[in-house]
Image (cartoon, helix red, strand yellow):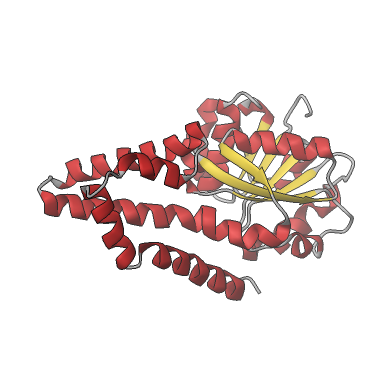
Amino acid sequence: MAKKHDIAIIGAGNLGIAIAKGISGAKLAKPKNMYLTRRHLEKLDHLKSQKFKITSDNKDAVQNSEYIFLCVQPKQLPAVLEEINSVLDPEKHVLISTITGVEIAAIEEHLEQTMPVIRAMPNTATAIQESMTCLCAKNVSDQQLKEVKKLFEALGEAMIIDENLMKAATVLAASGIAFFLRYIRAATQGGIQLGFHADEAQKIAMQTARGAASLLIEGENHPETEIDKVTTPQGCTIAGLNEMEHQGLSSAVIKGLLASFEKINTITQ
């Protein structure tokens, strides 16, 4: 990476700010080497004390950077690319889009020359450096892709996939945050019915969910392996699991994922 001002985040809203903080927190870039742009700069005032470069001049940010994060809304993309086209250099810049549903081909339609482009799909856990980010790329070197993957690993986990899986990744990882939260909410409500106060039930549900995920992450086991450790013959756990399955738990989750996938295919066409 360049030694000075090597990262520009165009459209520094909640996601852009989380990306900037994650990268700087991991010491992959210094705040003074990161440009954050936004039309309403007062919303970035709180970052000035952390030495980030705050500006509304997208062209200046791009000229002084190497990795260009596009974090704007889909409808803003054409105007942004038109604005910065004249200063884009394929020998220097890598474009990184976090814009939901916008394919690389759609980005290229607004570029005046062939550029290295990486498409990234993080989720809202970026804010606490626990995101699952999926990446795909075109016209990038192995080294460029490796370095950008490292940047997103500062925000959680990152995986390189084919672009034809990006919509599925959006459903499984981005929408998936809401799906897991809904289970935690349901477990909390169940806990209240069992006799706990709401805050107690939610704390138990949250930590249990964290523990379950950690067992898979640390042990690298299949979920059923860990389930078998909890279930005993004629026990309360297997009784609960069987009732949930009789009521369609697994089927409902799969159908929900498929419904989201069908919807994203209609809204991104």
Residue 111: x and y, percent? 83, 59
Q: Which residue is drawn at 20% across and 55% down?
A: 189
Residue in the foreground of this view, choosing between 93 and 218: 218
Q: Is residue 161 above or below residue 92?
A: below
Q: Is residue 253 above or below residue 66?
A: below
Residue 255: x and y, percent? 46, 69
Quadrant location, the N terminus: top right
Quadrant location, the C terminus: bottom right
Q: Which residue is drawn at 45% across and 46% down?
A: 223
**In the image: residue 30, left or right of residue 105:** left
Quadrant of the image occupied by residue 240: bottom left
Residue in the foreground of this view, choosing between 106 and 234: 234
Residue 221: x and y, percent? 50, 39
Residue 102 seen in the figure: yes
Residue 53: x and y, percent? 63, 33
Residue in the foreground of this view, choosing between 88 and 129: 129
